[in-house]
Amino acid sequence: MQLLPEAVLVITALVLLGVAVAYESKTLKPLPVNSAIGIATCGILLATVAWWFAPPERLKGGIDIISGALFHLKLPEVKSDSSLIATDGLARLFKGLVLGLGLLAVLLPPARREIAQPGEFYALMLFALTGLLLTTGTNHLLFLFVALELASLSLYLLAGFSRGARAAEASLKYFLFGGVSAAFLLFGLSLIYGFSHSASLQGVAVALAAGPPSPLAIAGLVMVVVGLGFKLAAAPFHYWAPDVYQGAPATSVALVAAASKAVGLVVLVRFLMIGFHAASGSAAWGGMVAGWSSWLAVLAAVSMVFGNVLALAQTSVRRLLAYSAVANTGYLLVALSANGVSAAGAALFYVVVYGLATLGALAVAASVERERGNDSPSAFAGLVHRSPWQAVALMVFMTSLAGIPPLAGFVGKFAMFSAAMAESTKSGTPGLTWLVGLAAIMSAISLYYYLSVLKQAFVKEAPDGEAIADSTVSPSHLLAIALPAVALVVLGLFPALLLDPIARAVAESLDLR
């Protein structure tokens, strides 16, 4: 029952492949895009229903609780560190959130004639989403790697699915950087297993508690952080991101930017705060102690500066969003550097908000690019006159990314930075004031490039008088723009709707240590 959502996605992907092959053999034409989107959407909705009704209790001795109740068996509980599948609150909640982000990515259709085989394309989307769900719900080292690679291999193919030179270059870079990061991750996991003699994060925590961490454990942790830094597009492991964001189909980029980033942060939180909580150290000013907290603080500073400064010079909105992803990874790492449950919960809230805003911005950029032929800021000129609803939605997305109230992006950044300050100043030192101050400065700098796009959309006039024909925006594309915009407004006004469940789930899951 716990794996029923993943099973539904796999079955839907296989059905979609079968339907695509049967349709093409009968009509000598590929399956229509709208049909592929419809089948994939139905599969994700069914998986969401399965996730909603899956029992929250842990499994027992290989037989689930429902079977035990049916046959009146009193089965012993299996310890959580012996299971491949984590059934805690964090896994359950983020499976639902990742399904939602994946649904929005699927609803964003590719450009006309961009995808030659829509059936295969959306089947890969479902396989990637399956890998992301499996990655979200495990504390097992080997299962974590296998699930990540299932998602990653599918994403490499999705990045290069369109038959363009730019997409091929993006896919190749994504694959090469991904292969190197996978090697770092797997080698690091093997070193950690050699140190702890356990394949679970709980076993690693027990081994660390028995004595000071050995060089083997430290080397393994460094390699794992490098591997996960690639998934999160943290500088200097981000060099794949600009080309993928600009060259890959917008549908693929939406899945990478939203769902994949959220899953990467969940894995990092589990790994550091369950398995290596004893080796956290401190990044507090005047009280620094060697450990992963100080490493993340350095990565956060580099990512924020690098991402925001390079975003200022971009002439492509998609590429701008890629460097924005690097900068926002820095903000997320600021919260994790505090090594606190409340800060981790705030970071997980913000990564969902960031995913919604970036996905919506990509959807609007894709619409403009298809009508104007490029995604430069000047292509957005006069958008408010040509398509007012898209301009308003773009304003919601960009101002949320910039952290302007009352949208959810402001709430997320405020929660992260305040929690980081509160956690790090408990010892009486200035704590992470230096890092939070840098984050505030970088957030102010980001206002320039976010608002420059809005200036084109609301102030500038289109030089050629061309108009975006709203009738060409499909219903699914409309939903991919409207739903994230509404969600950002609602979560900005009522953040407790998501922030409180995430805080409870994090507190429950991190209590496993």
Image: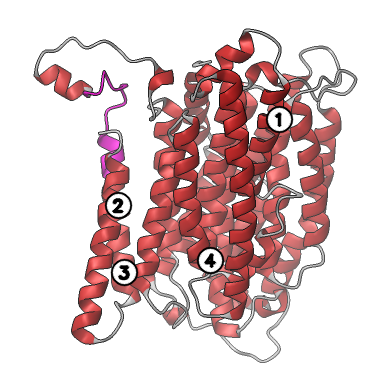
Is residue 65 inside the magenta stretch? no
Q: What amino acid is at disc 1?
A: Ala
> Helix, strand or loop at disc 4?
helix
* Res. 10 mark: 2
> Which is more toward the observer, 197 or 298?
197
Q: Which badge, 1 or 2, is on the more N-terminal residue?
A: 2
Give x and y (percent) for residue 11.
25, 53
Gap in Å between the C-alphas at discs 3 and 4?
A: 18 Å
Residue that label 1 marks: 219
> Helix, strand or loop at disc 3?
helix
Residue that label 4 marks: 159
- Residue with the most extreme right position: 286
* Res. 36 mark: 3
Give x and y (percent) for residue 178.
60, 54
Give x and y (percent) for residue 224.
64, 36
The region drawn magenta spans 49-63
